[in-house]
Structure formats: structure tokens, C-alpha cells
Amino acid sequence: MRLYLIVLFVSLAFASTEISDPDYFTDALWNPMAFMVLNGDREALVIDYATEGEIVYRLDLHAGTHHGRALAAGPGPGELNDGGDKIIGQFADGSFFLWDSGDRRASLFDADLTYIGPVRESERGRAATMALVNDSTVAVLRFSASDELFTIHRLTRTTEHAVIVEEPLYVITTAAHEALQPMADNPLLRQGWFHRQEDTLCWGVRYSSLVVCLDEQRVRHAGLTAGDLQLPNYKNEPGVYEAPDAAKYPSGIVDISVGARHVYVLFSDRKVSRLRALRVAVTGGMSGLESLLDDVLHTDQLHVLDRETGALTQTITLPVRGKHINVKDGHVYLLNTVDAEPTIHRIERAAL
């Protein structure tokens, strides 16, 4: 199977589209989940669970080849769990901070993906996710039925490891915005996608249109402007937690990317058809259900927010669907894994 990276040249409002012949492609790419375009448009860091144990690797987009060291599945230092989300942040020197939700640990890697060392955290509570806010600050999303949502900490690095300072710079609770209130009772509502640009980290919350952006000092803004969809007040029996039923609730935010002036939000108001899910379960089993959910998570709806205020500036219907977005160097990159072979589309805009 090959990955095609199709280049689309479009106007500011995507009014017209010209699709050239595929000029980016690669062999041995089976099921990419996410990617990060590195400086320039030559390389990408790809997360893929179906490439013979290589979960994260560098891809030369133009040559269509893997190169350098890859991060493989395994229990040892510098190895990754073969499941769960991977959140990657890049430091100014090119090295990487990687959170592995499968093993619930963070690690440091240099620019060539050589393992540097662990990120050590004090036992303040159970971490659901960690993400870089800037080169010296990390946000820790807490997994608990409580008002505490995020703790923001100073991060200190040495040549062999990093340490999260125990005392937080500040704490974000579910009182930060009324749309966050359901998370106090059900920690499984604390799902979403992170992306950082410079000093700003943004979180797009699944099953809603809620976007929270913060820096090392404060919550810069939080709101529902990217689709006007409230997070469901999804409660269960005492002590039992479940995520919202995909047949009853829309997918909401599918992914998020932060640019120099805007926040780009992929948004889907689609639900999984219960009748179709039953039919697929009979004929295709779990793999069929996963494909059905993956299809719902692909969308052509893009909401553009002002990075400083969170105000909605534009709503765009994209020329292609995607489930992962990355804005870099004047281009919008979209990952599509359902309409054909796995494809990253590159969309060029006159202004971002």
C-alpha cells in the first residue's frame, strides 16, 4: 500500500481547486493515525500502528522513504505501547517530548528519535495526558471525577531526563467554563486533541465544539464557537463511567491545529448509524465497526478561530475530508484513510 500526498492549490476561501498528479508517496504505510510536519515541508513524523512494530518514524514526503531511527513497540526505555494515543511536542532545539497514553508515561527523544530519557512526575494524581505548553512548561490533564482538570507545571531538563516540578504554576478546574461542568462527574468526557504553537497549547474536546487554549500563566480562552455543540452531560451509575454513545452523540471536534494567528478545528456533526452498525457487526465484526467509526471521524468542516480570542472568523467546506489536520508553513495538511489508500492532502492557502 502506498501513501499519496496530493497537492491542492486553492484560494483563501477554497473557492476553486486544482489537483495535480500525486507527487508524494511511500510504500509500507498501512494505517497512519496522525502525523507532524517538521520544519519546511520535506519531512513528517508519522504515528502508525501497522508498520511491523515501527510506531513512530520520520518520513521523507518527497522521496517517499523512511529514514533514521524509528520508535518501536516494547516495554523498555524509549519503546512505546502498541496502543493508545501518542502526543508529540517539539522543543525549539528540534528534540521531542512524547506522551504515550498506552503506558501512561512521557519520554524525551532527540531530533533523530534517539532516546534521551524519561520525564519524571510527582504523584499528585492520575495523569490522563501530558502535553507541552512551551519549552519549559507542561500541561497535565487529570483523570478523576473531580473539579480539578489540568495542572500546569514547570518542566526542567537535563542531558539525561526531565522533571516536572511538583508545585503547579496554576490549576484549571471545570469552573473555567460552564461547558466543562460535565467533566467533573465523568472523567471519560476528558477526551480530545492537543496542538501547540509557540507559547499556546489548545485542546479540542471530543463530543463537543469546546476549544480551550492556554499558556503558562492562564487560560487564554475557552468556548464553543467551533460548531456550537455542548459537551453531553453523560452520567452513569455511581462509580461506573462510560464515554458517550456514538450512535446518540455527534463526534464533535475531530482534530485541532494551531497556526501563527488562527486555531483550525476539524468538526463533525455526524453520528454512527445504529442500524448500519448492527449490519456491519454481523458482516464485518469489530474491524467493520472500527471502519464505520473511522468514516464518521472524517469530515470536510473546518472552523477557523482567532488564536488570541477564540472568536470564530471563518467556516470552510474543505475540498477533501480528513480526520487529522496539521497547519505548517502556509499549508493545511489533511489525513484521509477511508476514501482511497491512506492519503495526506496538502492544501495551500494565500493567507493563514
Image (cartoon, rainbow, N blue to C red):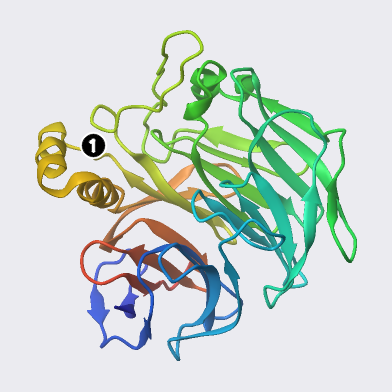
Q: How many marks do you count on the picture?
A: 1
The x, y position of residue 25, in whole percent, is: 36, 84
**Residue 245 or residue 264, whichever sits in front:** 245
**Residue that appears at 54% across and 80% down:** 43
Q: Position of residue 170 (x, y in %)?
A: 79, 31
Q: Which residue is mark 1?
A: 271
Kind of residue sitting beneath label 1: Lys
Residue 56 in the image: state x and y as whole percent.
54, 68
Provide residue 292's location: percent of width, then percent of height. 22, 47
Answer left or right for 313 relative to 297: right
Local SS, label 1: loop
Q: Is residue 143 above or below residue 8?
A: above
Which residue is at the front of the view, 159 or 309? 159
Q: Nearer the viewer, residue 304 or 189?
A: 189
Q: Is residue 195 left or right of residue 159?
A: left
Q: Residues within 10 Å of mark 1 (few under 14, many from 20)?
A: some
Determine the residue positioned at 24% across, 52% down.
291
What residue appears at the point 30 percent right and 66 percent down from the top-left corner?
A: 14
Q: Is 164 left, or right, of 344 in this rendering?
A: right
Inspect this view and state whether residue 197 appears. Answer: yes
Quarter of the rendering containing residue 208: top left
